[in-house]
Every structure is written in C-alpha cells, then in structure tokens.
Image (spheres, rainbow, N blue to C red):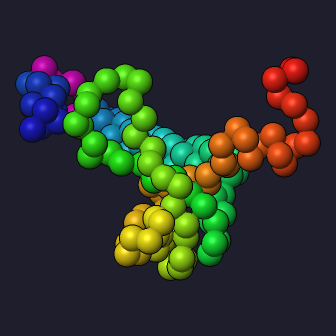
C-alpha cells in the first residue's frame, strides 16, 4: 500500500516515471536480498553458538547400581531458602532409553523418573574420609 502511494506521488509530481519505477523496484529487490542474507548469516551464527555450547556440556552417565539423589520440585510443605529439595539416596535398578530411570529406595517399590531430575550421589563425609584415607579434620 505504501509503495503504491509513493509511486502515485512521483507520478503526480511529473518526475521521470520509468526511471523512478525501475529505481524503486531495484531498491525493493535489494532489500529482499539483504533480508535473505541476514537470515542465512543469523542461522549460521546460531548453529555455531549451539555447537560451542553443546561441546562444553558434560554428559551425565548413570548406570544400573549407581546411587542417585532426586530433585523434588513439588515439595512446598515448609517453605524456606535453606530447605533442600534433593532427596535420597536412591539406587538405580534399570536404565531406559531417552534418559528414563527406574529407581528404588530401601525396600520401597521401584518407580520411574526422568534422568534430568537426578544426579549422582557422592556419599556422606564419613565415606569420603574412608575413600581418601586422610583425616579431613586436620585440613
């Protein structure tokens, strides 16, 4: 609509009609080409940034028999900053494809969880002392 009004105004002012229309259409074509170039370069930039980001992410490896802790996002009984939402440890009984896990806690029935809601359990400080064979109280 705006292009039509601009051409109408040029015709009304008795300017070079053919030269003006050619110039105007060339400008529109150039802007379309520039828009496509920007779109392609933006897509290439986003792809490079994604590859760079994904390269720095460590893959979480959880196998059968590992101990994990589970993030509980629905726990709102005692609101507070210092209340931990990580519960466990749980033992992994089965690993399904697409990061699904089956976990069990001391005698309870096993249940499935998304692998993104768990992380490896490193044990308590007493177990760390035994494994490291050093007295951490001296440090």
The quadrant of the image that shows the N terminus is top left
Residue found 58% across the figure and 49% down from its top: 50
Q: 76 above or below 52?
A: above
Q: Is residue 16 magenta?
A: yes
**Can you tell which quarter of the image residue 132 is in?**
top right
The quadrant of the image that shows the C terminus is top right
Residue found 87% across the figure and 21% down from its top: 138
Q: 9 above or below 111?
A: above
Whether residue 48 is visible here, answered yes or no, is no
Count of marks, rendered view: 0
User: Would you say 57 lies left or right of 37 here?
Assistant: right
- Residue closer to the observer: 52 or 98: 98
Examine the residues drawn in magenta and state their main secondary structure: loop
Residue range of the region highlighted in magenta in the rendering: 13-18
Q: 32 above or below 83?
A: below
Q: Does the magenta stretch include residue 8?
A: no
Whether residue 85 is visible here, answered yes or no, is yes
- Residue closer to the observer: 84 or 16: 84
User: Would you say 5 lies left or right of 86 here?
Assistant: left
Residue found 9% across the figure and 31% down from its top: 5
Residue found 13% across the figure and 32% down from its top: 2
Question: x%, y% of residue 10?
Answer: 16, 26
Task: Tell which residue pokes out farthest to the right in this image.
Answer: 133
**Can you tell which quarter of the image residue 31 is in?**
top left
Question: x%, y% of residue 84?
Answer: 42, 35
- Residue closer to the observer: 29 or 40: 40
Question: x%, y% of residue 59?
Answer: 66, 58
Question: x%, y% of residue 3?
Answer: 17, 36
Q: 133 above or below 96?
A: above
């Amino acid at each position: 609509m705006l292009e039509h009004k601009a051409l109408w105004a040029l015709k009304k002012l008795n300017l070079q009609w053919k030269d003006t229309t050619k110039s105007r259409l060339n400008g529109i074509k150039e802007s379309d080409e520039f828009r496509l170039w920007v779109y392609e370069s933006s897509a290439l930039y986003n792809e490079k940034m994604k590859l760079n980001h994904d390269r720095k992410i460590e893959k979480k490896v959880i196998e059968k028999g590992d101990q994990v802790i589970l993030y509980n996002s629905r726990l709102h009984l005692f609101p507070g900053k210092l209340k931990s939402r990580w519960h466990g440890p749980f033992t992994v009984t089965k690993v399904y494809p697409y990061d699904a896990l089956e976990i069990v806690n001391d005698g309870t029935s096993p249940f499935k969880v998304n692998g993104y809601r768990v992380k490896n359990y490193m044990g308590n400080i007493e177990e760390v002392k035994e494994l490291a064979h050093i007295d951490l109280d001296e440090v």
